[in-house]
Amino acid sequence: MGKKVLDILNEIRAAKNMAPIETIGADTKLREDLGLTSFDLAELTVKIEDEFDIDIFEDGLVSTVGEIFAKLEK
Amino acid sequence: MVFLYNNGKAYGYDDLLRSLNKDASYYPYYKTSDVYAYFVNLIKALAASKPLVLLDSDINPSEIEGLDESKINVAESIASASFQSMDEVVAAVKVSQSEITIFTSGTTGQPKKVVHSICTLTRSVRMGEKYQGQIWAYAYNPTHMAGLQVFFQAFENQNTLVNVFNQSREYVYQQICEKGITHVSATPTFYRLLLPFEQAYESVVRVTLGGEKSDQHLYDSIAKIFPNAKINNVYASTEAGSLFAAKGDCFQIPEAIKDKFKVVDDELLIHKSLLGSSDSFKFTDDYYHSGDLIEWVDEAQGLFRFKSRKNELINVGGYKVNPGEVEVAIQDIEGVRQAMVYGKANSILGNVLCADVVLEAGTELTELDIKKALGAQLQDFKVPRRIKFVDEISLTRTGKMKRV
Protein backbone atom coordinates (compact mmCIF):
# COMPACT_ATOMS: atom_id res chain seq x y z
CA MET A 1 0.00 0.00 0.00
CA GLY A 2 2.79 2.45 0.98
CA LYS A 3 4.67 1.64 -2.23
CA LYS A 4 1.58 2.22 -4.37
CA VAL A 5 0.89 5.61 -2.76
CA LEU A 6 4.56 6.54 -3.27
CA ASP A 7 4.30 5.57 -6.96
CA ILE A 8 1.23 7.75 -7.43
CA LEU A 9 2.91 10.70 -5.68
CA ASN A 10 5.97 10.34 -7.91
CA GLU A 11 3.80 10.11 -11.01
CA ILE A 12 2.22 13.44 -10.06
CA ARG A 13 5.61 15.00 -9.31
CA ALA A 14 7.07 13.75 -12.60
CA ALA A 15 4.39 15.60 -14.59
CA LYS A 16 5.44 18.76 -12.75
CA ASN A 17 9.12 18.11 -13.50
CA MET A 18 9.87 17.51 -9.83
CA ALA A 19 12.43 14.92 -8.77
CA PRO A 20 11.05 11.63 -7.44
CA ILE A 21 11.05 11.11 -3.69
CA GLU A 22 12.60 7.99 -2.17
CA THR A 23 10.55 7.56 0.98
CA ILE A 24 7.47 8.93 2.66
CA GLY A 25 6.66 8.92 6.34
CA ALA A 26 3.46 9.32 8.30
CA ASP A 27 4.16 12.99 9.00
CA THR A 28 5.17 13.95 5.45
CA LYS A 29 3.01 16.95 4.56
CA LEU A 30 1.31 16.75 1.17
CA ARG A 31 1.39 20.48 0.39
CA GLU A 32 4.44 21.74 2.24
CA ASP A 33 6.82 18.77 1.92
CA LEU A 34 5.71 17.33 -1.41
CA GLY A 35 4.68 20.57 -3.09
CA LEU A 36 1.21 19.39 -4.13
CA THR A 37 -1.42 21.93 -5.26
CA SER A 38 -5.16 21.39 -4.97
CA PHE A 39 -5.16 20.09 -8.57
CA ASP A 40 -2.46 17.59 -7.60
CA LEU A 41 -4.43 16.56 -4.53
CA ALA A 42 -7.50 16.01 -6.72
CA GLU A 43 -5.44 13.78 -9.02
CA LEU A 44 -4.15 11.94 -5.96
CA THR A 45 -7.70 11.25 -4.75
CA VAL A 46 -8.83 10.02 -8.17
CA LYS A 47 -5.87 7.70 -8.51
CA ILE A 48 -6.13 6.36 -4.98
CA GLU A 49 -9.83 5.82 -5.62
CA ASP A 50 -9.00 3.87 -8.81
CA GLU A 51 -6.57 1.72 -6.85
CA PHE A 52 -8.27 1.26 -3.47
CA ASP A 53 -11.88 2.35 -4.14
CA ILE A 54 -11.79 4.92 -1.31
CA ASP A 55 -12.25 8.69 -1.65
CA ILE A 56 -9.70 9.96 0.88
CA PHE A 57 -11.08 13.51 0.87
CA GLU A 58 -14.72 12.53 1.11
CA ASP A 59 -15.16 13.56 4.74
CA GLY A 60 -12.74 16.40 5.25
CA LEU A 61 -9.29 17.57 4.39
CA VAL A 62 -6.27 15.32 4.52
CA SER A 63 -2.90 17.01 4.92
CA THR A 64 -0.34 14.30 5.70
CA VAL A 65 0.62 10.94 4.26
CA GLY A 66 -0.20 9.36 7.62
CA GLU A 67 -3.81 10.54 7.31
CA ILE A 68 -4.06 8.89 3.88
CA PHE A 69 -2.82 5.60 5.30
CA ALA A 70 -5.31 5.87 8.15
CA LYS A 71 -8.19 6.24 5.65
CA LEU A 72 -6.98 3.33 3.57
CA GLU A 73 -6.61 1.07 6.62
CA LYS A 74 -10.19 1.62 7.77
CA MET B 1 -31.14 1.74 -59.99
CA VAL B 2 -30.38 0.47 -56.51
CA PHE B 3 -32.12 2.31 -53.68
CA LEU B 4 -30.38 0.65 -50.72
CA TYR B 5 -27.63 -1.84 -49.97
CA ASN B 6 -28.10 -3.25 -46.51
CA ASN B 7 -26.43 -6.28 -44.90
CA GLY B 8 -25.44 -7.85 -48.20
CA LYS B 9 -28.85 -7.30 -49.82
CA ALA B 10 -29.68 -4.90 -52.65
CA TYR B 11 -33.09 -3.21 -52.92
CA GLY B 12 -33.87 -1.49 -56.22
CA TYR B 13 -36.16 1.49 -56.71
CA ASP B 14 -38.52 -0.93 -58.45
CA ASP B 15 -38.58 -3.06 -55.26
CA LEU B 16 -39.30 0.08 -53.29
CA LEU B 17 -42.17 1.03 -55.61
CA ARG B 18 -43.70 -2.44 -55.19
CA SER B 19 -43.33 -2.30 -51.38
CA LEU B 20 -45.04 1.10 -51.29
CA ASN B 21 -48.00 -0.13 -53.34
CA LYS B 22 -48.28 -3.44 -51.52
CA ASP B 23 -50.16 -3.00 -48.23
CA ALA B 24 -52.77 -0.37 -47.49
CA SER B 25 -51.34 0.14 -44.01
CA TYR B 26 -48.38 1.63 -42.19
CA TYR B 27 -46.95 1.80 -38.67
CA PRO B 28 -47.37 5.18 -36.95
CA TYR B 29 -44.94 4.01 -34.23
CA TYR B 30 -42.41 1.74 -35.86
CA LYS B 31 -39.45 0.16 -34.13
CA THR B 32 -37.29 -1.99 -36.33
CA SER B 33 -33.66 -2.73 -37.02
CA ASP B 34 -34.47 -3.48 -40.68
CA VAL B 35 -33.42 -0.26 -42.38
CA TYR B 36 -35.23 -1.07 -45.64
CA ALA B 37 -38.53 -1.74 -43.85
CA TYR B 38 -37.98 1.47 -41.88
CA PHE B 39 -37.55 3.53 -45.07
CA VAL B 40 -40.58 1.92 -46.73
CA ASN B 41 -42.69 2.84 -43.72
CA LEU B 42 -41.31 6.39 -43.64
CA ILE B 43 -42.01 7.02 -47.33
CA LYS B 44 -45.47 5.45 -47.08
CA ALA B 45 -46.45 7.70 -44.19
CA LEU B 46 -45.11 10.81 -45.89
CA ALA B 47 -46.70 10.10 -49.26
CA ALA B 48 -50.05 9.57 -47.51
CA SER B 49 -49.58 12.66 -45.28
CA LYS B 50 -49.91 10.52 -42.16
CA PRO B 51 -48.26 11.31 -38.80
CA LEU B 52 -45.22 9.31 -37.84
CA VAL B 53 -43.08 8.88 -34.73
CA LEU B 54 -39.52 7.79 -35.45
CA LEU B 55 -38.19 5.38 -32.84
CA ASP B 56 -34.63 4.12 -32.53
CA SER B 57 -34.34 0.39 -33.08
CA ASP B 58 -32.58 -0.02 -29.74
CA ILE B 59 -34.66 2.39 -27.71
CA ASN B 60 -36.28 1.29 -24.51
CA PRO B 61 -39.80 2.83 -24.63
CA SER B 62 -39.58 3.64 -20.92
CA GLU B 63 -36.77 6.08 -21.79
CA ILE B 64 -39.34 8.28 -23.49
CA GLU B 65 -41.86 10.06 -21.38
CA GLY B 66 -45.48 9.83 -22.49
CA LEU B 67 -44.93 7.14 -25.10
CA ASP B 68 -47.68 4.54 -25.15
CA GLU B 69 -45.87 1.23 -25.57
CA SER B 70 -48.97 -0.57 -26.81
CA LYS B 71 -48.94 1.54 -30.00
CA ILE B 72 -45.50 0.36 -31.11
CA ASN B 73 -45.51 -1.75 -34.28
CA VAL B 74 -49.29 -1.70 -34.57
CA ALA B 75 -50.39 -1.18 -38.17
CA GLU B 76 -52.97 1.41 -39.16
CA SER B 77 -54.78 1.30 -42.47
CA ILE B 78 -54.39 4.00 -45.10
CA ALA B 79 -55.80 4.48 -48.59
CA SER B 80 -54.12 1.97 -50.87
CA ALA B 81 -51.45 3.49 -53.07
CA SER B 82 -50.95 2.90 -56.76
CA PHE B 83 -47.87 4.84 -57.69
CA GLN B 84 -46.79 4.37 -61.30
CA SER B 85 -43.27 5.65 -60.86
CA MET B 86 -40.77 6.85 -58.28
CA ASP B 87 -41.14 10.39 -59.64
CA GLU B 88 -44.76 10.28 -58.49
CA VAL B 89 -43.71 9.08 -55.05
CA VAL B 90 -41.08 11.80 -54.70
CA ALA B 91 -43.62 14.42 -55.77
CA ALA B 92 -46.08 13.18 -53.13
CA VAL B 93 -43.40 13.20 -50.41
CA LYS B 94 -42.42 16.77 -51.25
CA VAL B 95 -45.89 18.11 -50.53
CA SER B 96 -46.51 15.84 -47.55
CA GLN B 97 -48.57 17.25 -44.68
CA SER B 98 -47.19 14.68 -42.22
CA GLU B 99 -46.13 15.57 -38.73
CA ILE B 100 -42.88 13.75 -38.11
CA THR B 101 -41.81 13.32 -34.50
CA ILE B 102 -38.17 12.69 -33.75
CA PHE B 103 -36.18 12.60 -30.53
CA THR B 104 -32.99 14.34 -29.52
CA SER B 105 -30.16 11.90 -28.90
CA GLY B 106 -29.67 13.26 -25.41
CA THR B 107 -25.92 13.09 -24.74
CA THR B 108 -27.17 13.82 -21.25
CA GLY B 109 -30.67 13.35 -19.89
CA GLN B 110 -33.90 12.13 -21.42
CA PRO B 111 -34.53 12.23 -25.17
CA LYS B 112 -36.75 15.20 -26.04
CA LYS B 113 -39.52 15.09 -28.59
CA VAL B 114 -39.52 17.48 -31.58
CA VAL B 115 -42.24 17.60 -34.25
CA HIS B 116 -41.18 18.47 -37.80
CA SER B 117 -42.84 19.08 -41.14
CA ILE B 118 -41.46 17.99 -44.48
CA CYS B 119 -40.31 21.59 -44.97
CA THR B 120 -37.92 21.69 -42.02
CA LEU B 121 -36.63 18.21 -42.85
CA THR B 122 -35.91 18.83 -46.52
CA ARG B 123 -34.91 22.50 -46.41
CA SER B 124 -31.35 21.76 -47.49
CA VAL B 125 -32.06 19.10 -50.15
CA ARG B 126 -30.47 20.01 -53.46
CA MET B 127 -32.02 18.72 -56.66
CA GLY B 128 -30.95 18.69 -60.26
CA GLU B 129 -28.82 17.03 -62.89
CA LYS B 130 -25.53 17.31 -61.05
CA TYR B 131 -27.03 15.42 -58.11
CA GLN B 132 -27.86 12.36 -60.20
CA GLY B 133 -26.09 9.01 -59.93
CA GLN B 134 -24.57 9.58 -56.51
CA ILE B 135 -23.77 6.65 -54.23
CA TRP B 136 -23.96 7.52 -50.55
CA ALA B 137 -22.36 5.82 -47.58
CA TYR B 138 -25.21 5.89 -45.08
CA ALA B 139 -23.40 6.41 -41.80
CA TYR B 140 -26.04 7.91 -39.53
CA ASN B 141 -28.83 6.54 -37.42
CA PRO B 142 -31.85 6.70 -39.80
CA THR B 143 -34.22 8.01 -37.13
CA HIS B 144 -32.13 11.05 -36.30
CA MET B 145 -31.91 14.44 -37.98
CA ALA B 146 -28.59 13.92 -39.75
CA GLY B 147 -29.70 10.51 -41.04
CA LEU B 148 -32.95 12.03 -42.33
CA GLN B 149 -31.01 14.79 -44.10
CA VAL B 150 -28.87 12.29 -45.99
CA PHE B 151 -31.86 10.08 -46.71
CA PHE B 152 -33.92 12.88 -48.29
CA GLN B 153 -30.99 14.19 -50.30
CA ALA B 154 -30.38 10.74 -51.76
CA PHE B 155 -34.00 9.62 -52.07
CA GLU B 156 -35.41 12.73 -53.75
CA ASN B 157 -32.66 12.46 -56.37
CA GLN B 158 -33.15 8.67 -56.57
CA ASN B 159 -29.58 7.99 -55.59
CA THR B 160 -28.15 4.86 -53.98
CA LEU B 161 -27.65 4.44 -50.22
CA VAL B 162 -25.12 1.99 -48.78
CA ASN B 163 -25.79 1.37 -45.12
CA VAL B 164 -22.58 1.48 -43.07
CA PHE B 165 -24.00 2.80 -39.79
CA ASN B 166 -22.26 1.18 -36.80
CA GLN B 167 -20.13 -1.01 -39.07
CA SER B 168 -16.45 -1.82 -38.70
CA ARG B 169 -13.60 -0.03 -40.43
CA GLU B 170 -12.95 -3.03 -42.70
CA TYR B 171 -16.60 -3.24 -43.74
CA VAL B 172 -16.78 0.49 -44.53
CA TYR B 173 -13.67 0.36 -46.73
CA GLN B 174 -14.85 -2.79 -48.45
CA GLN B 175 -18.21 -1.16 -49.27
CA ILE B 176 -16.52 2.00 -50.58
CA CYS B 177 -14.52 -0.12 -53.05
CA GLU B 178 -17.22 -2.60 -53.97
CA LYS B 179 -20.08 -0.13 -54.43
CA GLY B 180 -17.97 2.73 -55.76
CA ILE B 181 -19.23 5.13 -53.09
CA THR B 182 -19.06 8.77 -54.19
CA HIS B 183 -20.46 10.58 -51.12
CA VAL B 184 -19.82 10.13 -47.43
CA SER B 185 -21.63 12.11 -44.75
CA ALA B 186 -20.84 11.24 -41.14
CA THR B 187 -19.72 12.43 -37.73
CA PRO B 188 -16.04 13.20 -37.04
CA THR B 189 -16.10 10.16 -34.77
CA PHE B 190 -17.00 7.97 -37.75
CA TYR B 191 -14.07 9.32 -39.78
CA ARG B 192 -11.69 8.81 -36.86
CA LEU B 193 -12.59 5.14 -36.94
CA LEU B 194 -11.23 5.08 -40.50
CA LEU B 195 -7.77 6.26 -39.39
CA PRO B 196 -4.90 5.76 -39.79
CA PHE B 197 -4.37 6.36 -43.49
CA GLU B 198 -3.30 3.20 -45.32
CA GLN B 199 -4.69 3.55 -48.81
CA ALA B 200 -6.38 6.20 -50.94
CA TYR B 201 -9.99 5.71 -52.08
CA GLU B 202 -10.50 7.59 -55.31
CA SER B 203 -14.22 7.09 -55.95
CA VAL B 204 -15.26 9.45 -53.14
CA VAL B 205 -15.76 13.01 -54.39
CA ARG B 206 -17.52 14.56 -51.42
CA VAL B 207 -17.00 14.16 -47.71
CA THR B 208 -19.29 15.89 -45.22
CA LEU B 209 -18.73 16.16 -41.49
CA GLY B 210 -21.46 17.02 -39.03
CA GLY B 211 -22.66 16.77 -35.49
CA GLU B 212 -19.46 17.45 -33.62
CA LYS B 213 -16.49 19.75 -33.79
CA SER B 214 -13.70 18.42 -35.95
CA ASP B 215 -10.05 19.37 -36.13
CA GLN B 216 -7.30 20.03 -38.65
CA HIS B 217 -5.54 16.74 -37.94
CA LEU B 218 -8.70 14.89 -38.95
CA TYR B 219 -9.18 17.03 -42.09
CA ASP B 220 -5.61 16.29 -43.16
CA SER B 221 -6.10 12.56 -42.69
CA ILE B 222 -9.42 12.56 -44.56
CA ALA B 223 -7.79 14.46 -47.41
CA LYS B 224 -5.21 11.67 -47.70
CA ILE B 225 -7.73 8.83 -47.55
CA PHE B 226 -10.09 10.53 -50.04
CA PRO B 227 -7.75 12.53 -52.30
CA ASN B 228 -10.49 13.45 -54.82
CA ALA B 229 -13.03 14.59 -52.26
CA LYS B 230 -14.17 18.07 -51.45
CA ILE B 231 -14.53 18.23 -47.68
CA ASN B 232 -17.22 20.30 -46.01
CA ASN B 233 -19.15 20.69 -42.80
CA VAL B 234 -22.85 20.62 -42.13
CA TYR B 235 -24.81 21.96 -39.19
CA ALA B 236 -28.02 20.10 -38.54
CA SER B 237 -29.76 20.02 -35.21
CA THR B 238 -32.68 17.89 -34.07
CA GLU B 239 -34.50 21.12 -33.30
CA ALA B 240 -34.01 22.97 -36.57
CA GLY B 241 -32.79 20.62 -39.24
CA SER B 242 -30.10 21.93 -41.53
CA LEU B 243 -29.60 25.71 -41.46
CA PHE B 244 -26.20 26.84 -42.61
CA ALA B 245 -23.93 26.55 -45.57
CA ALA B 246 -20.39 25.44 -44.88
CA LYS B 247 -17.42 27.56 -45.89
CA GLY B 248 -14.20 25.75 -45.13
CA ASP B 249 -14.19 25.23 -41.38
CA CYS B 250 -16.73 28.05 -40.97
CA PHE B 251 -20.46 28.34 -41.50
CA GLN B 252 -22.45 31.06 -43.18
CA ILE B 253 -25.92 32.22 -42.28
CA PRO B 254 -27.83 32.48 -45.56
CA GLU B 255 -28.82 36.05 -46.45
CA ALA B 256 -32.52 35.14 -46.68
CA ILE B 257 -32.79 34.08 -43.02
CA LYS B 258 -30.17 36.44 -41.60
CA ASP B 259 -32.65 38.24 -39.32
CA LYS B 260 -33.68 34.92 -37.71
CA PHE B 261 -30.49 34.66 -35.64
CA LYS B 262 -29.01 36.46 -32.67
CA VAL B 263 -25.84 35.91 -30.70
CA VAL B 264 -25.97 36.53 -26.95
CA ASP B 265 -22.96 35.77 -24.71
CA ASP B 266 -21.44 33.87 -27.65
CA GLU B 267 -24.49 31.58 -27.79
CA LEU B 268 -26.37 31.21 -31.06
CA LEU B 269 -30.09 31.98 -30.73
CA ILE B 270 -32.50 30.78 -33.42
CA HIS B 271 -35.91 32.31 -34.18
CA LYS B 272 -38.81 29.95 -33.55
CA SER B 273 -40.05 30.21 -37.14
CA LEU B 274 -37.09 28.04 -38.22
CA LEU B 275 -37.73 25.25 -35.73
CA GLY B 276 -39.89 22.20 -35.43
CA SER B 277 -42.23 22.33 -32.46
CA SER B 278 -41.72 20.88 -29.02
CA ASP B 279 -42.95 21.37 -25.47
CA SER B 280 -39.35 21.24 -24.34
CA PHE B 281 -38.31 24.37 -26.24
CA LYS B 282 -37.88 27.47 -24.13
CA PHE B 283 -37.95 30.79 -25.91
CA THR B 284 -36.69 34.23 -24.93
CA ASP B 285 -38.61 36.77 -27.04
CA ASP B 286 -39.33 34.07 -29.66
CA TYR B 287 -35.67 33.00 -29.84
CA TYR B 288 -34.45 29.54 -28.95
CA HIS B 289 -31.16 29.01 -27.09
CA SER B 290 -29.25 26.55 -29.24
CA GLY B 291 -26.57 25.84 -26.63
CA ASP B 292 -23.95 26.24 -29.37
CA LEU B 293 -21.21 28.72 -28.60
CA ILE B 294 -19.88 30.46 -31.70
CA GLU B 295 -17.39 33.14 -32.67
CA TRP B 296 -17.78 35.53 -35.57
CA VAL B 297 -15.25 35.33 -38.35
CA ASP B 298 -17.00 38.06 -40.32
CA GLU B 299 -20.18 39.29 -38.69
CA ALA B 300 -21.32 41.43 -41.61
CA GLN B 301 -21.22 38.40 -43.91
CA GLY B 302 -22.76 36.11 -41.30
CA LEU B 303 -19.63 33.96 -41.23
CA PHE B 304 -18.93 32.13 -37.97
CA ARG B 305 -17.17 29.20 -36.38
CA PHE B 306 -18.41 26.82 -33.68
CA LYS B 307 -16.48 26.83 -30.43
CA SER B 308 -18.29 24.31 -28.25
CA ARG B 309 -21.55 23.28 -26.69
CA LYS B 310 -22.59 25.47 -23.79
CA ASN B 311 -23.52 22.68 -21.42
CA GLU B 312 -20.39 20.75 -22.23
CA LEU B 313 -18.05 23.06 -20.35
CA ILE B 314 -16.56 21.25 -17.38
CA ASN B 315 -16.04 23.20 -14.19
CA VAL B 316 -12.69 22.22 -12.68
CA GLY B 317 -11.93 24.06 -9.46
CA GLY B 318 -13.74 27.14 -10.78
CA TYR B 319 -12.08 27.03 -14.21
CA LYS B 320 -14.29 26.23 -17.19
CA VAL B 321 -12.76 23.69 -19.54
CA ASN B 322 -14.01 23.10 -23.07
CA PRO B 323 -13.52 19.35 -23.52
CA GLY B 324 -13.48 19.72 -27.31
CA GLU B 325 -10.44 21.96 -27.16
CA VAL B 326 -8.52 19.45 -25.04
CA GLU B 327 -9.60 16.56 -27.29
CA VAL B 328 -8.22 18.37 -30.31
CA ALA B 329 -4.90 18.94 -28.52
CA ILE B 330 -4.65 15.27 -27.57
CA GLN B 331 -5.57 14.12 -31.06
CA ASP B 332 -2.80 16.29 -32.47
CA ILE B 333 -0.22 14.21 -30.61
CA GLU B 334 1.54 11.76 -32.92
CA GLY B 335 0.22 8.24 -32.37
CA VAL B 336 -3.18 9.18 -30.94
CA ARG B 337 -6.22 8.05 -32.89
CA GLN B 338 -9.03 9.39 -30.73
CA ALA B 339 -9.58 11.06 -27.39
CA MET B 340 -12.54 11.82 -25.18
CA VAL B 341 -12.33 14.31 -22.33
CA TYR B 342 -14.80 14.38 -19.46
CA GLY B 343 -15.14 15.44 -15.84
CA LYS B 344 -15.20 13.05 -12.92
CA ALA B 345 -16.88 14.28 -9.73
CA ASN B 346 -14.30 15.10 -7.11
CA SER B 347 -14.52 16.32 -3.53
CA ILE B 348 -11.67 18.85 -3.91
CA LEU B 349 -12.22 20.49 -7.30
CA GLY B 350 -15.83 19.66 -8.06
CA ASN B 351 -14.59 17.83 -11.16
CA VAL B 352 -11.29 16.31 -12.13
CA LEU B 353 -10.52 16.41 -15.82
CA CYS B 354 -10.09 12.90 -17.24
CA ALA B 355 -9.36 11.58 -20.71
CA ASP B 356 -9.86 8.26 -22.45
CA VAL B 357 -7.39 7.82 -25.26
CA VAL B 358 -7.26 5.35 -28.14
CA LEU B 359 -3.77 4.91 -29.58
CA GLU B 360 -2.93 3.97 -33.14
CA ALA B 361 -1.75 0.39 -33.41
CA GLY B 362 1.93 -0.02 -32.68
CA THR B 363 2.38 3.22 -30.77
CA GLU B 364 3.49 3.38 -27.19
CA LEU B 365 2.67 6.48 -25.22
CA THR B 366 2.48 6.84 -21.45
CA GLU B 367 0.22 9.06 -19.39
CA LEU B 368 3.27 11.19 -18.64
CA ASP B 369 4.13 11.61 -22.36
CA ILE B 370 0.65 12.93 -23.05
CA LYS B 371 0.63 15.24 -20.03
CA LYS B 372 4.02 16.67 -21.02
CA ALA B 373 2.90 17.23 -24.60
CA LEU B 374 -0.28 18.96 -23.44
CA GLY B 375 1.54 20.98 -20.76
CA ALA B 376 3.62 22.57 -23.49
CA GLN B 377 0.55 24.08 -25.18
CA LEU B 378 -2.37 24.22 -22.74
CA GLN B 379 -2.89 25.97 -19.44
CA ASP B 380 -2.37 23.68 -16.49
CA PHE B 381 -6.06 23.40 -15.57
CA LYS B 382 -6.84 22.07 -19.06
CA VAL B 383 -4.46 19.13 -18.78
CA PRO B 384 -6.37 15.96 -17.84
CA ARG B 385 -5.29 14.55 -14.52
CA ARG B 386 -6.13 10.98 -15.30
CA ILE B 387 -5.55 9.46 -18.70
CA LYS B 388 -6.80 5.99 -19.45
CA PHE B 389 -5.81 4.04 -22.51
CA VAL B 390 -8.79 2.24 -23.99
CA ASP B 391 -9.52 0.11 -27.06
CA GLU B 392 -12.53 2.10 -28.12
CA ILE B 393 -14.69 5.02 -27.08
CA SER B 394 -18.39 4.47 -26.54
CA LEU B 395 -20.83 6.34 -28.74
CA THR B 396 -24.36 7.64 -28.33
CA ARG B 397 -27.09 6.33 -30.58
CA THR B 398 -26.43 9.19 -32.98
CA GLY B 399 -22.82 8.14 -33.26
CA LYS B 400 -21.42 10.97 -31.20
CA MET B 401 -19.05 10.42 -28.33
CA LYS B 402 -20.81 9.73 -25.08
CA ARG B 403 -19.46 11.84 -22.23
CA VAL B 404 -19.45 10.03 -18.92
Image (cartoon, helix red, strand yellow):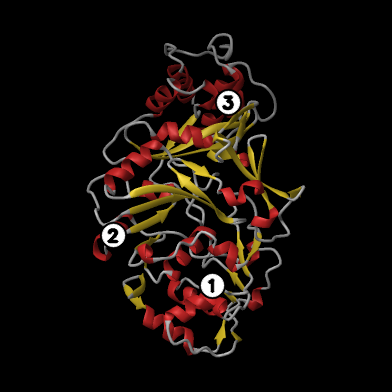
Residue pictured at 62% horizontal, 74% vertical: B98
| In this rendering, the label closer to the viewer, 2 or 3 | 2
The residues bearing labels 2 and 1 have C-alpha atoms spaced at a distance of: 30 Å
Amino acid type assigned to the residue bearing label 2 in the image: Ile
The image shows residue B24 at horizontal and vertical percentages of 55, 89
Q: Secondary structure at mark 3?
A: helix
Q: Which mark is residue B94?
A: 1
Give the residue pinned by disc 2.
Answer: B176
In this rendering, the answer to whether B382 lies above or below B264 is: above
Q: Label 3 belongs to which residue?
A: A42
Q: Are marks 2 and 3 on the same chain?
A: no
Q: Name the residue type under label 3.
A: Ala
The vertical placement of A17 against B263, above or below, is above
Q: Residues within 10 Å of mark 1 (few under 14, many from 20)?
A: some
Question: Toward the viewer: A45 or B372?
Answer: B372
Q: Local crowd at mark 2 within 10 Å, few (<14), some, or many (≥20)?
A: many
Quarter residue B30 falls in: bottom right
Q: Chain of mark 2?
A: B
User: In which quadrant is the N terminus of chain B drawn?
Assistant: bottom left
Q: Position of residue B242 (x, y in %)?
A: 54, 55
